[in-house]
Image (cartoon, rainbow, N blue to C red):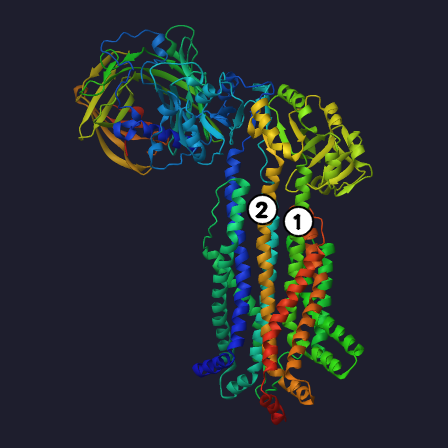
């Protein structure tokens, strides 16, 4: 009996291969996008972790001497007091017309000696005798090896990994000789995991200052936000796919009601029937999910190289662009597919289980929603909207944010047919002429059948608008932040106060402005933070978009009467414009402005440089921003290293950082762009399959119209117009939904996840493009059914009347 | 000590051919280094300090200690000097490399640490007058004002999870091994200068984790320098310093040869510091049981016999896994003796691959 039941159930799919295709395609698409996004996220995060690890290794706090080099005796004193420190002797070296940066390390105590590139070749015979006696060894990037060897006059050059093209690493003994130094280190690195109970550094070497490692995690944190939103995108794509699955399964159950009844009447026990249906669903799900996983893997593999390339550019760290297959990922994808199929089929199976055997099969169009259904949908939508509203006002946390997002989207989807019907009814009333009247009425008739596909389109469009707006806002804000943070063309850090003074003097005739950037560590609101001093300059006034500002904000800051604080500090302390901000124990200034400070976990404040210097006379006055005409940047930079003698790594070129940082976003847009197209594709597929399914059912409705005199071609054209109309109406509804989605992502989820808010920007041109794309997708989807209708042989249309009961 | 430095050092040692030429690169020719000569005349305090013209040198202290509750402990403090060239130079250019090893063994754990430094800048080194040997914050410092500099020493070192601070008082004279301090290491004549101060009474504190333990006991200081201590056919050594309960002491070692035989040497030290040296063959050391440590089979129970003096003892490790996972790894830990001459001592084993 089971076998007979099974073969009867399968016969349905044999007769409706398109339906089976729709079902599997829906499942596959849902799984593909979801798992593709997950794979990208997972792989990128692994890469970030590795890259940051690599960066963190090099980033150790260091001790420097504001007066110049550090006497070797200081190093020895620290070692003999138990401090694990290791010296660096760094300086520029002119070789063959190029300036190289020499880094001398103490080979015996160094934390990360260079890794020799040539595993197994000639370079592996390097030993302590080679490094520590004779001429020594100089490690260089492979690209520089030939040039250095040709230049002559240098110790043996050995290629090593991870070195910049102008960077040389050698033992401190060799560095002393190359740089003509007396051997006094330029800084001491403080290694991690110091023994507890050591005499404080300030007591041992009072003249030295501790410098934090260069912060490198800012962009890492920014990309976190990107990944979170990518996940939201994946989830939405999944939901869109599920709508298709739900539609296909619902139809299959509806069309087989007669068969179920017959099977039951023939003696197939209900439990066995339900079991068979579940088995059938399981088989289809597994097939769809496997295809989806393969597609998802493909999507990820295609998009991942961009992410990897970005990482390589950003961190200079070698990150693999290859995708690793993780069983856990596949399992999660299968589970998601099973969950989705279960949700989609639950209603159908439940109905079969409750179906009375003896009632007539009542074949009807599967989703001809009654007013009652519509009312139920409306009530549910309202309830969900209320839930979203409650969560928005009272909820907190990331989960609440995502639940709210889900509630909003489902509510919008449920409301869509109601809104469409209302619009169509109004249009029908306003229409004149028989054909127009019929067109509107018939369109209205189509809405219930197409509603699932339209909902899918709505979600796809809303997701596109939402995520697109989010990403673009993100980009705008990010670039604004870069501009604000990197307003000067060059950033230089002098090694000593003396050098800084000479530098300012030297730069004055060679640049448009030299802007001091001085800072002190401070406890702000009980947390470790920094207070910066800046000089009043058009650079800041013109480039710095503040989140909130008092009138005359820049005048106040310049006069030392107000402070700018970062958003993190404002949020944490709950203070705003005009409130006093405590900058030190007995120093408070009113808040004149709040600025965004993405990626910085610490509170931060900015005051006028004079006010800061007056407050902290001993502040280290080493960092400067230089304004200079962009075309002179390279010349000035070269002059700084070659003429002034500043090591190259103390000069930061704004343009280079900016283009690097922006390129990461351009690349990540490629990912979202691709996902946009894919979700729209899914929605178009949903429309196509719905229309194809409806086509057969609609013949009885179209035949009379044809009989009255509308040609088949005209009917076909009207079909296309109808679909386009519905798509455009859906797109119009999707716009506010998408913007709401963007708002939730930017203002709630981002704030919950990261503690900063990204200002929302609007991009109407993008929407227009999207509408056109949606119309195109819907039009393409409608084309095939319309052509079919236009070519339906009259005999078939006539048959409708013959069959009429 | 972090792993990267270890690897670096390993590559150093590998480069000098440790595997091919015996343990820790000790088996090499002299290449301009001074070579120990027979009939030495030691000059003190100068010879307590370093001898940069020789390739390798060490200040090596092992201590058998006991807490008030009777628990046994072992402590090792070692400063190695390894010269890349037979001279000293000022600043970073010094070819003298220094390596400190510290160990602390309890009945159920073994702690160890390693420090590396170069000479020439004062981060590590040794001075004869006043006597001090140090690397970073580890030190061995003379505290006495009269007599031999080695008569009173303070000894301190620390590492992850342990630290110690001990006072050593010598209750007897320096003793010289081999022929008046000329200790032959092979039939081919490789030799070192080698003397000891085996008569220390020790008191002080061990810090183990968060726990401070007051201890007392005996310690043994070895001073040895040479330029080519191992013969090419020798793969490693087993060395013991034994404090017998009757007050006599025995230093013995066997240099294992690649053909399976061994070269032995021993010094029996009476209670008042009179020495009897025993040439190759007098001492026999036979492993009775091995323990798997760090992936190798290492003998941790031995039978040591010196038939001429009626000595036959079985020595057993206090903690069989006293492995020094340092730049060149070896076994070093406290032992207990039973047999004709019960007592306590230290065992060192190198070259077990």
Q: Quadrant of the N terminus of chain B?
A: top left
Residue A435 tag number: none
**Residue A457 percent coordinates (x, y):** 64, 67
Q: What element carries label 2?
A: helix
Q: Is mark 1 on a helix, strand or loop?
A: helix
Q: In which quarter of the image is the C terminus of chain B?
A: top left
Q: In this view, does B35 lie to the left or right of A63?
A: left
Crowding near the residue tagged with mark 1, few <14, some 14–19, many ≥20 C-alpha atoms within 10 Å: many
The answer to whether residue A430 is seen in the rendering is yes
| Residue at mark 1: chain | A
Viewer-side residue, B151 vs A74: A74
Q: Earlier in the sequence, mark 1 or mark 2?
A: 1
Q: In this view, does A705 lie to the left or right of B156?
A: right
Crowding near the residue tagged with mark 2, few <14, some 14–19, many ≥20 C-alpha atoms within 10 Å: many
Residue labelled with disc 1:
A474
Looking at the image, residue B201 lies above or below residue A273: above
Viewer-side residue, B313 vs A214: A214
The answer to whether residue B137 is seen in the rendering is no
**Residue A64 percent coordinates (x, y):** 57, 23
Q: Separation of disc 1 and disc 2 at Cα? A: 12 Å
Looking at the image, residue A482 lies above or below residue A617: below
- The image quarter containing residue A585 is top right
| Residue at mark 2: chain | A
**Same subunit, tags 1 and 2:** yes
Viewer-side residue, B77 vs A524: A524
Q: Which residue is drawn at 73% across and 42% down?
A: A545
Q: Which residue is drawn at 69% across and 24% down?
A: A508
- The image quarter containing residue A687 is bottom right
Please identify, in this view, whether the residue under mark 1 or under mark 2 is nearer the observer. Answer: 2
Residue A664 tag number: 2
């Amino acid at each position: 009996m089971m076998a007979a039941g099974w073969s009867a159930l399968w016969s349905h799919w044999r007769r409706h291969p398109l339906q089976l295709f729709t079902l599997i395609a829906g499942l596959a698409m849902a799984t593909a996008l979801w798992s593709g996004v997950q794979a990208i996220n997972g792989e990128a995060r692994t890469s970030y972790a590795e890259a940051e690890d690599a960066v963190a290794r090099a980033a150790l706090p260091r001790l420097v001497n504001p007066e110049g080099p550090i006497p070797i005796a200081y190093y020895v004193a620290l070692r003999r007091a138990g401090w694990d420190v290791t010296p660096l002797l760094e300086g520029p070296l002119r070789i063959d017309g190029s300036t190289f940066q020499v880094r001398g390390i103490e080979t015996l105590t160094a934390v990360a000696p260079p890794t020799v590139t040539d595993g197994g070749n000639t370079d592996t015979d390097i030993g302590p005798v080679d490094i520590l006696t004779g001429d020594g060894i100089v490690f260089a990037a492979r690209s520089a090896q030939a040039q250095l060897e040709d230049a002559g006059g240098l110790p043996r050059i050995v290629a090593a990994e991870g070195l910049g093209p102008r960077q040389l690493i050698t033992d401190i003994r060799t560095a002393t000789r190359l740089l003509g130094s007396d051997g006094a280190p330029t800084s001491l690195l403080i290694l991690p995991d110091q023994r507890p109970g050591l005499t404080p550094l300030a007591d041992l070497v009072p003249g030295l200052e501790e410098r934090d490692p260069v912060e490198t995690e800012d962009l890492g944190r920014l990309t976190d936000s990107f990944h979170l939103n990518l996940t939201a995108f994946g989830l939405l794509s999944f939901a869109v796919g599920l709508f298709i699955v739900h539609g296909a399964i619902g139809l299959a159950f509806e069309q087989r009601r007669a068969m179920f009844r017959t099977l039951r009447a023939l003696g197939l026990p209900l439990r066995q029937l339900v079991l068979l249906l579940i088995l059938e669903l399981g088989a289809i799900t597994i097939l769809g999910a496997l295809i989806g996983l393969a597609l998802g893997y493909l999507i990820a593999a295609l998009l991942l190289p961009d992410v990897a390339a970005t990482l390589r550019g950003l961190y200079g760290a070698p990150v693999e662009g290859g995708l690793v297959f993780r069983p856990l990922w596949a399992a999660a994808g299968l589970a998601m597919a099973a969950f989705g199929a279960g949700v989609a089929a639950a209603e159908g199976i439940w109905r079969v289980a409750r179906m009375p055997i003896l009632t007539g099969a009542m074949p009807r169009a599967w989703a001809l929603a009654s007013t009652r259904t519509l009312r139920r949908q409306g009530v549910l939508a309202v309830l969900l909207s209320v839930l979203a509203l409650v969560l928005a006002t009272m909820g907190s946390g990331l989960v609440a944010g995502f639940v709210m997002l889900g509630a909003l989207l489902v509510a919008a989807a449920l409301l869509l047919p109601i809104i469409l019907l209302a619009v169509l009814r109004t249009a029908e009333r306003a229409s004149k002429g028989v054909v127009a009247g019929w067109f509107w009425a018939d369109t209205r008739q189509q809405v219930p059948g197409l509603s699932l596909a339209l909902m899918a389109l709505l979600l796809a469009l809303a997701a596109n608008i939402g995520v697109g707006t989010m990403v673009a806002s993100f980009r705008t804000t990010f670039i604004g932040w870069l501009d604000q943070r990197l307003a000067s063309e060059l950033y230089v850090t002098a090694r000593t106060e003396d050098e800084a003074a000479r530098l300012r003097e030297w730069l004055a005739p060679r640049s448009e402005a030299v802007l001091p950037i001085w800072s002190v560590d401070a406890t702000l609101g009980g947390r470790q933070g920094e207070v910066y001093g800046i000089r009043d300059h058009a650079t800041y006034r013109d480039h710095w978009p503040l989140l909130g500002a008092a009138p005359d904000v820049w005048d106040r800051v310049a006069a030392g009467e107000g402070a700018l604080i970062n958003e993190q500090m404002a949020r944490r302390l709950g203070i705003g414009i005009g409130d006093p901000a405590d900058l030190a124990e007995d120093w408070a200034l009113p808040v004149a402005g709040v600025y965004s400070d993405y990626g910085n976990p610490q509170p931060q404040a900015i005051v006028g440089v004079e006010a800061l210097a007056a407050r902290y006379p001993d502040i280290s006055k080493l960092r400067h921003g230089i304004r200079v005409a962009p075309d002179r940047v390279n010349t000035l930079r070269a002059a700084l290293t070659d003429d002034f003698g500043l090591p190259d790594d103390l000069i930061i070129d704004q343009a280079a950082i900016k283009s690097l940082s922006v390129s990461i976003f351009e690349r990540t847009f490629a990912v979202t762009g691709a996902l946009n197209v894919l979700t729209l594709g899914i929605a178009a597929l949903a429309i196509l399959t719905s229309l194809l399914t409806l086509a057969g059912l609609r013949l009885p409705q179209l035949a009379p119209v044809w009989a009255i005199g509308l040609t088949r071609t005209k009917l076909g054209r009207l079909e296309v117009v109808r679909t386009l109309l519905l798509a455009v109406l859906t797109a119009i509804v999707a716009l506010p939904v998408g913007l709401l989605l963007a708002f939730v992502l930017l203002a709630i989820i981002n704030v919950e996840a990261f503690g900063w808010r990204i200002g929302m920007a609007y991009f109407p041109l993008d929407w227009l493009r999207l509408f056109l794309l949606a119309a195109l997708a819907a039009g393409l989807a409608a084309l095939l059914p319309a052509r079919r209708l236009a070519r339906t042989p009259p005999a078939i249309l006539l048959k409708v009347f013959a069959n009429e009961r | 000590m972090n792993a990267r430095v270890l690897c670096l050092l390993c590559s150093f040692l590998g480069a000098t051919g440790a595997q091919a030429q015996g343990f820790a690169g000790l088996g090499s020719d002299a290449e301009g280094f001074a070579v120990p000569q027979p009939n030495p005349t030691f000059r003190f305090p100068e010879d307590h300090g370093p001898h940069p013209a020789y390739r390798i040198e060490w200040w090596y202290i092992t201590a058998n200690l006991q807490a008030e509750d009777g628990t046994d402990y072992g402590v090792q403090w070692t400063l190695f000097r390894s010269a890349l060239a037979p001279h000293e130079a000022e600043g970073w250019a010094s070819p003298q490399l220094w390596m400190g090893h510290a160990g602390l063994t309890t009945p159920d754990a073994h702690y160890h640490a390693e420090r590396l430094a170069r000479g020439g800048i004062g981060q590590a080194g040794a001075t004869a007058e006043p006597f001090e040997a140090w690397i970073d914050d580890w030190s061995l410092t003379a505290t006495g004002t009269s007599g031999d500099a080695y008569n009173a020493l303070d000894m301190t070192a620390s590492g992850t999870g342990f630290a110690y601070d001990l006072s050593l008082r010598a209750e007897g004279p320096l003793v010289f091994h081999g022929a008046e301090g000329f200790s032959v290491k092979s039939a081919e004549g490789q030799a070192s200068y080698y003397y000891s101060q085996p008569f220390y009474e020790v008191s002080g504190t061990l810090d183990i984790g968060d726990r401070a333990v007051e201890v007392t006991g005996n310690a043994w200081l070895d001073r040895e320098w040479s330029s080519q201590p191992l013969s090419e056919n020798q793969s490693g050594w087993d060395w013991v310093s034994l404090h017998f309960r009757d007050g006599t002491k025995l230093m013995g070692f066997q240099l294992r040869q690649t053909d399976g035989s061994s070269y032995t040497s021993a010094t029996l030290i009476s209670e008042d510091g009179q020495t009897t040296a025993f040439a190759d063959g007098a001492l026999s050391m036979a492993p009775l049981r091995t323990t798997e440590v760090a992936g190798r089979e290492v003998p941790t129970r031995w039978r040591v016999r010196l038939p001429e003096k009626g000595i036959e003892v079985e020595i057993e490790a206090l903690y069989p896994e006293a492995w020094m996972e340092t730049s060149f790894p070896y076994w070093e830990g406290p032992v207990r003796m039973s047999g004709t001459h019960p007592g306590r001592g230290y065992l060192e084993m190198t070259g077990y691959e």
